[in-house]
Amino acid sequence: MTMSSSTSSTLSQYTAIGTPFGIVRPPSSLTSCNSFSATNSPRPTAVAIGAQQYNQRQLHHQGSSNSNTANTMDSSSEPNVQPPFDDFLRRFDDVSRQSQKSESLIKDLLAYAHSLSLHFERETNRLTEEIRVHQLDLADSKDSRRTLQKRLKEIENRQGSLAHENDALKNRNPYVVILIDGDGLIFRESLVRQGIEGGKLAAYAFKSSIAAQLGPRADEVEIICTIYANLYSLSQAMRRDGSIEHHNEIKDFMLGFTQAKATFNFVDVGHGKERADAKIQDTARFHSKNSNCRHIFLGTSHDAGYAPFLDEFCRDDVNKKRTVLLEGSPMVNEIARIGIEKLKIENMFKSEKLGCRRTSCNQIIAPGGEQYSPPLMHPSPILTNSVAGGPQPSQVPQPPRPLSQQQEAASQRKPTPPPTLTLPIKIKPANARQNTPATKKIIPPPQKPWNPGRRGLDPFLNVNQTVLDAIKRRRDSDKLCNNHYLRGPCAKAGECCFEHSYRPNKEEINVIAFLARLNPCTNGQDCEVEDCIYGHHVSILLLSLLCPSVKN
């Protein structure tokens, strides 16, 4: 039997394989198929056992006769059939190749398991570190949460304390403020004529009327009232209207009103409409920022000049809710359109403006109730300068004189022309008749030239009646600013409510100057302001007193 080269190499390799039982080599001769020599190996190997099993199968196929002979064979005798070594080697090669594949698989599994082990070890370390960090963060978060909870509790307690303190401060000194333009909202003559006592009665009644509007907690609310007025102009206007007989009556009334209550004041602001306006507006703005101020009562509903201020002031809903307008004479439309709440106190203020008792522009009701008319002339340019020559008695309104029924009927049938008062200047009379009978002229005796004072006469102004009427037709914010056009840029800038962008011509400048001179200068002839725009001699005062419609 010959062996292939591969089988030989395999066999030689097999003979060199070490096992736990020592070096096993195939026997050179086999005496028995069932056992190996005891001297060759301490125990049978797998190859020997396989050879025995093979021999047994071969012998089993032989006849029964041979089986008895085989059983009696000596262990040292050689078997009759030689083992098929080629088959063994072939099978061994198969097992070896399978073993190599198994080993390769096992190696790959071990390598993969090792890589997984390293990966999981790294992940375990990373996760362990993250757990440690998160545990630290958790502990820190718990501490921070406890601290924040403690601070939140303190803040909540502090907030509650501050809210309680704030409410206490708001309710500590609640008050309402009343600001009145005394030149327009005027107390009834029945109170004014009583002087000091009338002022006190008016203050007490006024306080009670306002307190009635404040509800059940009126006793806890302080009432502050301030009236701003030009005492001189107000007394003159009330005397012309017949409300008082002497200017001391209004002065005593102011004193009584101020003395009645510590928080009630009647303030004389002097000449100039803007003085009272500015005080009322600035004071209202100041109190609107105070949370203790519950209401702001404004006695300004009679004058449309307050409309821009009220419109701006009441854009704030809080201001609008707590602003109340006091009404005496009817409220002007410009203010009524703003929609502010109004309050009318009965038997407290005059329901008509001063001068409304005139039957016409040239008929004045005297304090005694009699009517008289100042002298009239045909419309002509109005001059405001004076020339040498004193005032003529015939040019000043004479004492009251009752009108006849014919004159009264004539005055009702057709309107009279605009009045033009005679000033202490020389005017060329127009070639026309007077439309209404004038008072009887008295020939005056010669008098010395009139000298108004150390300042002298104001410069000459030639005023065109048509231009004057056009300027007078301007209303509210469309009125031209006297200070802006006569003395340069207006000092109030954006706060002034009059027109500044219009460009008047020379005639309009003269009219603006004329209208400004209708306001007498408070210093009169003692005024040292070189460019003062107000009037400084008595003719201006007479014109403004006897015919306010020219001024308006």
Image: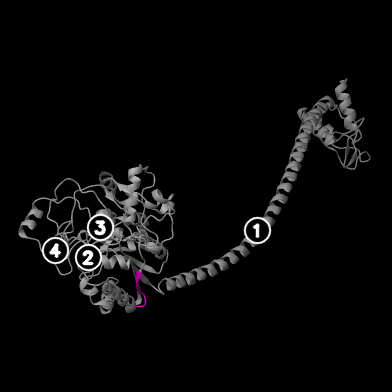
The kind of residue tagged 2 is Arg
Q: Is residue 7 magenta?
A: no
Secondary structure at badge 1 equals helix
Secondary structure at badge 2 equals helix
x and y, in percent, of residue 413 in the image:
8, 51
Disc 2 crowd, CA 10 A, few/some/many (<14, 14-19, 20+): many
Q: Relative to the observer, which residue lies in front, 235 or 170?
A: 235
Q: In this view, does 166 lie above or below 87?
A: below
What color scheme is it? Answer: one colour
Q: How far apart are marks 4 and 2 (CA)?
A: 11 Å
Disc 3 crowd, CA 10 A, few/some/many (<14, 14-19, 20+): some
Residue on which disc 2 sits: 240
Residue on which disc 1 sits: 137
Q: Is residue 96 left or right of residue 399?
A: right
Q: Distance between the residues labelled 3 and 1?
A: 86 Å
Compare marks 3 and 1 and give the one earlier in the sequence. 1
Q: Is residue 262 magenta?
A: yes
Residue on which disc 3 sits: 548
